[in-house]
Image (cartoon, rainbow, N blue to C red):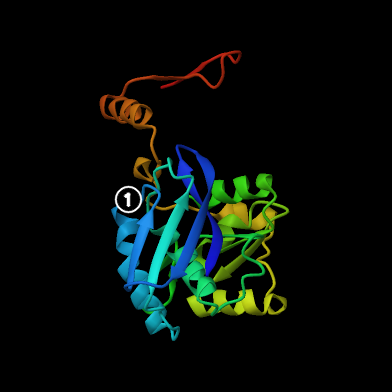
Amino acid sequence: MLARVWSASIVGIDAVKVGVEVDVSGGLPGIVVLGLPDSAIQESRERVKATLKNAGFAFPMRKIVINLTPADLRKEGPCFDLPISVGILAASEQVSADLLGDYLFLGEVSLDGSLRPVAGVLPIAAAAQKMGIAGLVIPADNAQEAAVVQDLAVYGCKHLSEVVDFLNNPGRYKPVQIDDTTKIATVSYPGADLHEVKGQAHARRALEIAAAGGHNLILSIAKHVQPFCWS
C-alpha cells in the first residue's frame, strides 16, 4: 500500500510544501528514508517505531520506504515525525486516508505517543493558507501560534491517538479559535534568538558581529525602498 501525507519545511524564512510518501510492501522488515533527510529524520525511524507500538498501534513488520519530496531539498528537524507516523498508519490501513490530501501535518512524537511542539509553525501556516490547504494538524502547544492565520483550520492534538481519531471521525473536532485583539498582544517568545532561523548563514553572522561589537546596521528591504539604519 502507498500513502501520501503533506508536511512542510522552512528554507530561510519561507515554507516549502513537502510530500511524505510511505510505501509498505513485502520483503525483509526495515525502514528506508529517502529525499535528503538529516540525522534527526534518520533517527525518526526508531522513534516512530517505538511510538506506534507504545500508542497501541501495530507496526507493520514489512519493508517500509519513506520518500520525502522534492528529493533535491534538504529536510531537517523532527517535525516530520507526525506525518511519517500517519503515513505508516495509512499505508497499513490502520487509519482513514480520506483527509490526507487536504491537511498538512507537523509535529515531533515522544515514545509514549504524545506530541511535542516544533519551530517554524507560523510561516508554515501562512504558506499553507496561500497554497489552499484546508488546515493544519499540529501539536496542541503550537495551535495558538498557527491559529493567528485567518481562513485556515488549525487542529491541535496532544497525542497521536487524537490525530488518528480526527482522521477517522473529523466531525468530532472543531478548529482552534483565538481572539486576535487579546491573544496576539499577549504572545511572548521567551528565549527566542538567531538559532531558530533556518539558513541565512551570512546574514546571521553579520547580525552577530554587529551585536557583539555595537556596530550599526543598514537593512535594505527592497531595491526601490530607501534603506534605514539601526544603531
Q: Which picture quadrant has residue 101?
A: bottom right
At x 70%, y 72%, the residue is 174
**Where, quadrant-wise, is the C terminus in this rendering?**
top left
State the image coordinates of residue 133 (x, y, percent, origin top left). 67, 54
From this viewpoint, which residue is outermost toward the front? Answer: 27
Picture layout, residue 72 above or below residue 184? above
Q: Residues within 10 Å of mark 1 (few under 14, many from 20)?
A: few
Q: Nearer the viewer, residue 231 or 23?
A: 23
State the image coordinates of residue 145 (x, y, percent, origin top left). 56, 56
**SS label for mark 1:** loop
Picture layout, residue 158 above or below residue 205? below
From this viewpoint, which residue is outermost toward the bottom? Answer: 56
Q: Nearer the viewer, residue 187 or 107?
A: 107
Q: Amino acid at mark 1?
A: Asp
Badge 1 is on which residue?
A: 38
At x 55%, y 46%, the residue is 123
At x 26%, y 29%, the residue is 212
The reply to whether residue 131 is in sight is yes
State the image coordinates of residue 227 (x, y, percent, origin top left). 52, 15
Residue 82 relative to residue 112: left or right:
right
State the image coordinates of residue 184 (x, y, percent, origin top left). 61, 52
Residue 168 relative to residue 36: left or right:
right
Number of dots carrying numbers: 1
Q: Nearer the viewer, residue 42 or 147?
A: 42
Q: Which picture quadrant has residue 183?
A: bottom right
The reply to whether residue 158 is in sight is no
Q: Nearer the viewer, residue 43 or 175?
A: 43
Picture layout, residue 200 above or below residue 17? above
